[in-house]
Image (tube, helix red, strand yellow):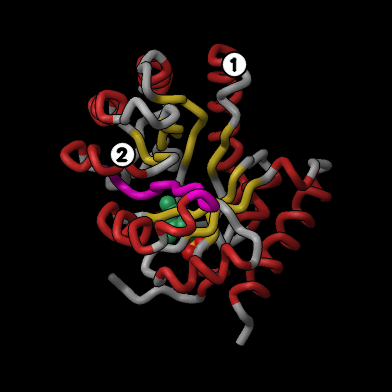
């Protein structure tokens, strides 16, 4: 079986190949290592292999892991990528560096109010329900401009971009479509919000090539690095 370090190297190779095909510089895509369900020791291995950006889905699991890895706090940027209920915002505002899953103003307002003054503003991506499925979280494309304008005005947040989890699709062309749609929304908003709105968080283990082809600036990869997750 391949080691975590070997798997990470393979993801950088995939990103580089996708960037070459798209005529993009390889530094334009960040690898976010998704460590949910895996232990702190796995994160340590990935840090030793040179990684810096880690994503957690579940608030409590993320908080526990960040505490366990306190000695590495300065070497890791922690991203919350899973659903965030508005009654759980305080420890997130106090602990994480990024939240990718904001899809309503109330959550954003609370994060802004609760972000401690001694920390830099919390980096925010708005999650967009790009495949339009009734069951999934994410703001609709129609409601996105108003939400983005309101979140951009909150003092302790820095609105950085958009995130989506498209419906899985098997072939490359179908995978590209939702990523293209998210990229178009991002471009429209960037015209208003400026260069700081620089993050397009899309692409996972199964579809990162399609996401990079459509302009992803950050791909979130878990199982291709750590192996299959246990059902939770
Ligand atoms: C679990 C998860 C990922 C990583 O998925 P893999 O298919 O394991 O790469 C990425 N983004 C989000 C929001 C996730 O929940």
Residue matched to label 1: 194
Task: Residue at 48% x, 72% y: name it.
Answer: 42
Q: Nearer the viewer, mark 2 or mark 1?
A: 2
Q: Is the residue 116 above or below the residue 149 in the image?
A: below
Q: Is the residue 167 above or below the residue 131 in the image?
A: below
Task: Residue at 46% x, 75% y: name it.
Answer: 228
Q: Is residue 140 left or right of residue 209?
A: left
Viewer-nearest residue: 51 or 183: 51
Task: Residue at 26% x, 24% y: name it.
Answer: 113
Tell how many labels.
2
Residue matched to label 2: 94
Kind of element beneath mark 2? helix
Residue 176 location in percent, x, y?
62, 46
Residue 221 location in percent, x, y?
54, 59
Residue 111 location in percent, x, y?
29, 30
Position of the N terminus by quadrant: bottom right
Give yes or no for residue 80 being in the magenta stretch: yes
Q: Is the residue 56 above or below the residue 46 in the image?
A: above
Instruction: Name the quadrant containing residue 207.
Output: bottom right
Magenta residues, start to end: 74-84
Q: Name the outermost residue toward the left.
A: 87
Task: Residue at 46% x, 25% y: name it.
Answer: 159
- Residue 91 is marked as none
Position of the C terminus by quadrant: bottom left
Instruction: Name the quadrant containing residue 25.
Output: top right
């Amino acid at each position: 079986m391949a080691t975590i370090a070997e798997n990470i190297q393979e993801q950088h190779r995939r990103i580089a190949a996708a960037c070459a095909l798209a005529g993009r510089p390889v530094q334009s895509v960040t690898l976010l290592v998704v460590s949910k369900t895996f232990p702190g020791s796995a994160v340590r291995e990935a840090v030793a292999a040179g990684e810096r950006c880690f994503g957690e889905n579940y608030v409590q699991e993320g908080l526990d892991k960040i505490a366990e890895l306190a000695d590495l706090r300065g070497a890791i940027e922690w991203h919350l990528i899973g659903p965030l209920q508005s009654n759980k915002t305080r420890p997130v505002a106090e602990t994480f560096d990024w939240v990718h899953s904001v899809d309503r103003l109330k959550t954003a307002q609370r994060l802004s109010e609760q972000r401690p003054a001694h920390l830099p503003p919390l980096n925010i991506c708005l999650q967009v329900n790009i495949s339009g499925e009734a069951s999934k979280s994410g703001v609709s494309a129609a409601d996105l401009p108003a939400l983005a304008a309101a979140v951009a005005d909150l003092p302790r947040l820095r609105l950085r971009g958009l995130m989506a989890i498209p419906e899985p699709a098997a072939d490359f062309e179908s995978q590209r479509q939702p990523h293209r749609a998210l990229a178009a929304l991002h471009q429209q908003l960037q015209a208003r919000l400026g260069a700081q709105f620089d993050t397009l968080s899309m692409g996972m283990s199964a579809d990162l090539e399609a996401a990079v082809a459509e302009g992803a600036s950050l791909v979130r990869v878990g199982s291709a690095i750590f192996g299959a997750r246990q059902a939770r």
